[in-house]
Image (cartoon, rainbow, N blue to C red):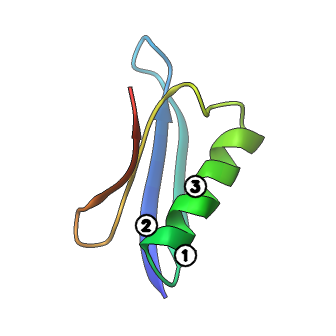
Amino acid sequence: MAIYKLTAFEANGEKILDESIEAANDHEAKVKGEQLLSENNALEKTHRCTSPNGNLILFHR
């Protein structure tokens, strides 16, 4: 399992979500990330999820 990093921000730059996600692969991390964003009403906020080697898995601006 690898550790992915999920962050979400308000329009003013305030960080509203900063989570580590443990997942077996990029697809699983993306699904878990979208679920966390949805649970925190941040799906439409600026967000990103990166893999352990720096790949961008999720991004919304």
Between discs 1 and 2, the one toward the N terminus: 2
Q: Are marks 2 and 3 in contact (CB under 8 Å)?
A: yes
Query: Which quadrant would residue 57 be assigned to in this image?
Result: bottom left
Q: Are marks 3 and 1 in contact (CB under 8 Å)?
A: no
Q: Residue at x 49, y 88 (%)?
A: 1
Amino acid bearing label 2: Tyr
Q: Residue at x 50, y 19 (%)?
A: 10
Q: Are marks 1 and 2 in contact (CB under 8 Å)?
A: yes
Percent across and percent down for residue 38 are: 71, 40
Are there few (<14), some (14-19), or many (20+) residues within 10 Å of tag 1? some
Which secondary structure lies at badge 3?
Answer: helix
Q: CA distance from mark 1 to mark 2?
A: 6 Å
Farthest residue toward the right? 39
Query: Which quadrant would residue 61 be assigned to in this image?
Result: top left
Residue with the mark numbered 1: 22
Residue with the mark numbered 3: 33
